[in-house]
Amino acid sequence: MARTPSNMLELGTKAPDFSLPDPHGNIHTRDQIAGEHGLLVVFYCNHCPFVKHIRERFVQVSNEYMEKGIGFVAINSNDAENYPDDAPEKMAEEMERYGYLFPYLFDETQETARAYDAACTPDFYLFDKDLKLAYRGQFDDSRPGNNELVTGADLKAAMEALIAGEKPPQDQKPSIGCNIKWKQ
């Protein structure tokens, strides 16, 4: 299993705009999804063991923090031709199976992943209410096989800071996951 770290985009970077379809063909944009206190963009997929490891807890955290004014979106930028488990029809099954309330979008051209300098799945980007990057990094210290509980502690602390009108801690650890499956 590959262990690719986040690229750690510079804090303060403006959230790149996007207009992407969900598996049902509905188009979603950055500005539609952003919440009162910010926007969480995660690069995500179905088949990655790192995503599977946090998936259930991530859905719980997303439900809790969407109610607190953070917009959530998951974006799958993987090459679905070579990785059919990440194709839109499989994304729809994933959404239904795990009860995703946030949009799960398909970045077929991979332009959005490139705009965010995304490297792995999961790769988290938390933007403040002005859509400036406030946190990029890991969900928490848990990884497949390390026996750490999946809590979402790092991401939750960053979101709590934004909700309180504060800056998240500057000591941010990169996310680790499978590399994005780029088209050749």
Image (spheres, rainbow, N blue to C red):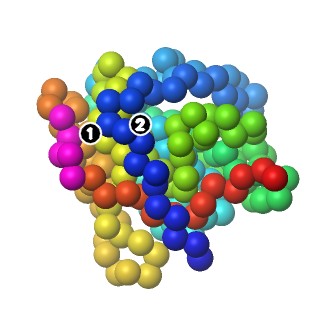
Q: In the rendered picture of this protein, how many numbered marks are placed on residues?
A: 2
Examine the rendered structure and indicate whether residue 64 appears above or below residue 35.
Answer: below
Rounded to the nearest angstrom, the CA distance separating label 2 from label 1 is 9 Å
Give the image location of residue 100, x and y in percent.
Answer: 53, 44
Q: Nearer the viewer, residue 168 or 40?
A: 168
Q: Secondary structure at mark 1?
A: helix
The residue lying furthest to the right in this view is 81
Mark 2 neighbour density, 10 Å: few (under 14) some (14–19) many (20 or more): many
Give the image location of residue 120, x and y in percent.
Answer: 54, 56
Q: Nearer the viewer, residue 168 or 170?
A: 170
- The picture quadrant where one finds residue 86 is bottom right
Examine the rendered structure and indicate whether residue 14 appears above or below residue 78.
Answer: above
Q: Residue at x 54, y 46 (%)?
A: 118
Q: Is residue 26 left or right of residue 160?
A: right
Examine the rendered structure and indicate whether residue 105 appears above or below residue 43.
Answer: above
Mark 1 neighbour density, 10 Å: few (under 14) some (14–19) many (20 or more): many
The answer to whether marks 2 and 1 mark residues whose Cβ atoms lie closer than 8 Å is yes
Examine the rendered structure and indicate whether residue 162 appears above or below residue 99.
Answer: above
- Residue under circle 1? 159
Based on the picture, tell me whether residue 4 belongs to the magenta stretch. no
- Residue type at mark 2 is Leu
Characterize the magenta stretch by its predominant secondary structure.
Answer: loop
- Residue under circle 2? 40
Disc with the residue nearer the chain's start (2 vs 1): 2
Q: Residue at x 75, y 39 (%)?
A: 108
Q: Residue at x 66, y 28 (%)?
A: 20
Give the image location of residue 88, x and y in percent.
Answer: 75, 44
Q: Secondary structure at mark 2?
A: strand
- Residue type at mark 1 is Met
Question: What are the residue bounds of the magenta stretch?
Answer: 167-171
